[in-house]
Amino acid sequence: MRAAFLLILWVLSFKSFGLNPENCTTKLSRLKASRKIYRELLSGNSEALQRTKINTTFPASNMYAPTPEQWLAPDREYQEQMGIRKALFEKRPKDILKILPSEEGKVQEAAQEFLEMTANHLTTQFPNVFVKEGNTIRSIPTGIVVNLDPKSGGHPLEKLGLLIQDDVTINLKNNEGKVIMAGGFLATPTNWALQDFIGMDVHAIHAGVPEYENRLKKTVEGAVERGVRGKCIGRNNWFLVTNPELALPSYRTSSYQEPTITEANVGQNVFLRSELESIVNLPKTGATIFTIRPRVWSLDFVKANAPEVAKNLATAVKLPESGYSEMEWTQPLLKFLGAPNQ
């Protein structure tokens, strides 16, 4: 479960920014789906790569306070990534959009609130990409028009999932006061799926995380409480993978066969995958929203464009807690990264 759902290892001391809800809605017509549903999308975003923090101690926080210009910002992969997301949803809608039946009404209300908030944020911060047109917004690169009227048809989670690059989960307090994953739109996860955790509380979700009970449980609880106070915080995680596909749901990766990795091909066949994550509370419904956006870089690209990240990877991989210290390709990887002999 190491790579399944490391979304909420947050700290308590970050500033927030305000997001004012405003009406906006959906017509999903012009965006063309990618022909190949599961395919790679390697990032050429060296700036984002250089900002990616690699933990060299465990557990460790790599939290930051997103600015309005950073949060949900469309990047250079926006159009291609949205095509992949649309194709995935058309192929497997029941896997990608799931709602806990007992919480359907609350999820609908929370998703609608977050859609309005997101639409206002996007059209304010990125007017060259998202344009307000009456009671709708339009994504210029994709042609998608989003109508925020709840009566216009289509679930607000679907509208969100096809408007932004980020997956979204909605987390609510149940009758026992536990925060549970109540629904979401999850098109491009890393080795998990909504079906794995829907209805579970945050502590059960993290049960397989090393040192969770002893060192991380209170941090998670504090992060949820921070969300309740209306704060927005972010982080990135990281993984090393041999599958460069953008979408790695558990129902697909469980049968994946890794290629043979050698020192000669490790730069082309091992990839750094990082998820940019945020957590924000909704002021009206009180729901806690998680957003997750993956990026994938080849290690050749990492070594050439972010030597400090490569150096930190070499340090982190050797730590048992990383989960990569005893892989079949650990030694070729370390040699490629230039790690000194042990």
Image (spheres, rainbow, N blue to C red):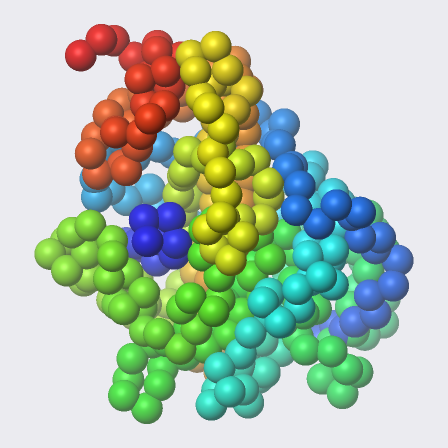
From the viewer's perspective, tell me whether residue 29 is left or right of residue 330. right
Q: Quadrant of residue 30?
A: bottom right
For image coordinates 39% across by 54% down, the residue present is 4
Q: Is residue 295 above or below residue 211?
A: above
Q: Does 150 sit above or below residue 280?
A: below
The answer to whether residue 177 is visible is yes
**Residue 285's x, y, as percent?**
48, 82
Give percent across and percent down for residue 59: 21, 43
Across the whole image, how many numbered discs are drawn on residues? 0
Residue 135 horizontal side relative to residue 288, left or right = right
Q: Quadrant of residue 227?
A: bottom left
325 and 45: which is toward the camera: 325
- Residue 279 falls in which quadrant of the image? bottom left
The extreme left residue here reads 214
Q: Is residue 334 left or right of residue 278?
A: left
Residue 129 can be seen, yes or no: no
Residue at the extreme right of the image, as rendered: 30
Residue situated in front as seen by the camera: 175 or 207: 207
* Residue under the point 57% across and 84% down: 109
Q: Return the x and y of residue 318 as percentages of the image width and height.
A: 24, 25
Q: Position of residue 71 (x, y in %)?
A: 55, 51
**For this rendering, which residue is in front, 13 or 29?**
29
Q: Residue at x 18, y 62 (%)?
A: 218
Q: Which quarter shows the C terminus?
A: top left
Left or right: residue 152 versus residue 336 is right
- In the displayed structure, 142 sits above or below 136; it is above
